[in-house]
Image (cartoon, coloured by chain):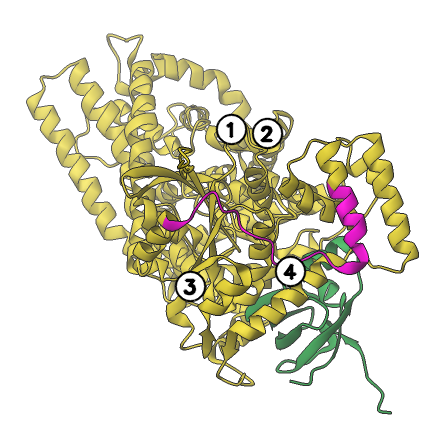
Chain colours: A green, B yellow
Amino acid sequence: MPQIIMRTLAEIPAGTTVTVSHLDSHPDTCNRLREFGFCENATIRCVSNGSSQLICEVCNTRVGLNYTTANAIVVLPSHE
Amino acid sequence: MKSTVPSPVINTIALIGNPNCGKTTLFNSLTGLRHKVGNYPGVTVEKKEGTVSLGTRDVTIVDLPGTYSLSANSPDEQIVSDVLFGRIPGTLIPDLVIFVADATNLERNLYLLSQIIDLTIPVVVALNMIDRIKDAGIDINTTMLRQEFGVMFIPMVASKGVGTDLLIAALDKVSLNKSAIRQWSVPEPVKVEHEELVSMLVAIEKMPEPAAFHEAQLLLSLSGPIESNLRSLTVETLSHIKMDHHNLQKLGVNRHSVFVESRYRWINSVYKKSVTHNIARRRQTFHDSIDAVLTHRIWGFVIFFALMAVMFQTIFTWANYPMELIGFGFDFLASRVSHIIPEGDLQNLIANGIIGGVGAVVTFLPQIIFLFLFLGLLEDTGYMSRAAFIMDRVMSKVGLHGKSFIPLLSSFACAIPGIMATRTIENPRDRLVTILVAPLMSCSARLPVFSLLIASFVPNILVFGYFSLPAIILISMYLLGLIAALTTARILKSTILKGPTPAFIMELPPYRIPTLRNTLIHMWERSVLFLKNAGTIILGVSIILWFLATYPKLEHGTSSQKLAHSFVGRAGHAIEPVLKPLGFDWKIGIGIISSLLQREVFVGTLGTIYNIEHADEANTSLKEQMQKDKDPVSGTSSFTLLTAICIMVYYVLAMQCMSTIAVVRRETNGWKWPAFQFAYMTLLAYVGTLITYRMGLWILS
């Protein structure tokens, strides 16, 4: 069986599409992320990834995050 | 027998939706008002009311700040739930909600919509920006959405007034007898606990059922110690909630995420049935390319500072001609008054007191217009959020995040909207730090002070072949304010308002071409406000100052001796010892004290004082009078380049604005923080100016 590699959103290069596996942070931060659309199974496209922040697209909206927040989003390769 | 009970009528409508989806644009279109709109989340931070005509009746319509959900994270989001749950005294619960949704990112908007439908308030959805879905390759089946959500969806383009008639017709058709019906249902693992808690909240806490339905979800997913969060609930309810938390933990249910996940799953299934994306997602879009440059870790900063430099350079060069024209107009007016009114106190009051004081300030109107033109363009294009995003790297170094930068950038215009904009900041401590440092950003009221001093004492030479020295000095003053704000924030965040650097997540709106109408309205409104201040506060201060600078009269002597003999002269000399270490004479001291009310009064004050002192010299501008002014004892110039720089440093750092103090008091609910802010800024200004003056003297020697 092929091994599924889970990474955090901060590690995803620009142009890659991923799916949210789960959120790993304080419940309040997780709920805020969910309200922005970073829900389990949501599809995310990484637009740009700098040295400490990244821009991604979720629910057709562009969102900016810093690495502390992006590290709370654990993602899987997307099938889309 | 037919029922004679009249059907209820709509009295209040609330406009609700995600941030930056066009609520205020629709509000303006429905009411004919002109509230500020912009292309970044968080333009509206308080509720605004207007009226809309429905048939023969006028109905109150309330524009509310944008929110992502009903679980409020910041003060502006709190207003939405407070209005919906009737927690604001004097504000009725709306009879109907117009839910404004951005058609280009509908999925996330539907989350809040389903929460509002849960409250059973009748809802009509305004599907805004429908003209953009074609380009985005999106197809929306509004009939399917209507079936699934049980509410009407009206496609529209609020900015062009398209669909407004259909929306009004739909509002007229909505029956208030028929509440919205919940379509999403509470997920199985928590259904029993949720139902029991709802019943308890209704029976014991006397909550209306819709509010209890929402509150029960929040209570079951609550994190942190229950007692400290929920002091208002009875002991019985609290112990029941604790028991629920315990049971759910035993069952292995993640109570923090179960409601949100389930709601999103339901929305996702509806979305897939109703919305199709026809264009396959390209690897890189045009917007991606722009973002790659504008938010680049090096180029992003270079572009930001280059934009700021061009802005200040332009303010200085382009505004020069209309300023000279206005100055000429006031000189002409003063000379006409001198011809028409016979020599005496009345002529002196009008020509030197009023025209001199008010004219000195009004001359700077073109610069204010250019400043607001630039800030308006930054806001409307969507660049404001990108600036906040790149500045997050700097802000995180001082313990704040990028969101705090928008209030700081808005404070370039005026600290009052800047301080109001802090309502979008989730963490109360970070919000307070941002409020405390926002007035250090150089606002438009400082511009006349800077401009007068730069134009009078900084030589107009070019540096690097393009940038003029006056523009460089001006941008240095703005940078000094920014550095002072960031340093103060760092100190506050590591001492009295200690706390971790918050998580940063922020919506970046799509780039849009600014509309001329919106930009012109914004410039017009700010200009009217500036002229209104000149016509009221500055006029009043000019008249009082003229009186104090003219009486008691000295029968014989030069104009300077007469001025020194007046109330103003005496008061000025009394405070001179305090200001002498800063290199300021008594006239500057009077300027500083009179401008405690408002910074630009300084220019008006100098205009009045110098006009009275040099009443015998016709057609001499304030600039020339300041350049010629000599200390009567030493015979040296009262104003030098160093004095001018010291005054500017003082004005960058000092809190000279009563309106800001009043807003800080309102936003922090007391006098403690505005008093602290006034004290620390005054001390900072004094020490900062003292250091500048001493260093200047040392360099010159």
| In-front residue for pair A63/B543 | A63
Q: Kindly identify the amino acid type of the residue bearing the numbered disc 4.
A: Ile
> Contact, CB < 8 Å: mark 4 with mark 1?
no
Q: Which residue is mark 1?
A: B662
| In-front residue for pair B660/B693 | B660
Instruction: Give the secondary structure at mark 3.
Output: helix
Q: Kindly identify the amino acid type of the residue bearing the numbered disc 2.
A: Pro
In primary-sequence order, the first of circles 4 and 3 is: 3
In primary-sequence order, the first of circles 4 and 2 is: 4
Q: Which residue is mark 2?
A: B674
Q: Which residue is mark 3?
A: B381
B317 versus B422 height, above or below? below
In primary-sequence order, the first of circles 4 and 1 is: 4
* Callout 3 crowding tier (Cα within 10 Å): few <14, some 14–19, many ≥20: some
At x 44%, y 15%, the residue is: B571
In primary-sequence order, the first of circles 3 and 1 is: 3
Q: Quadrant of residue B592?
A: top left
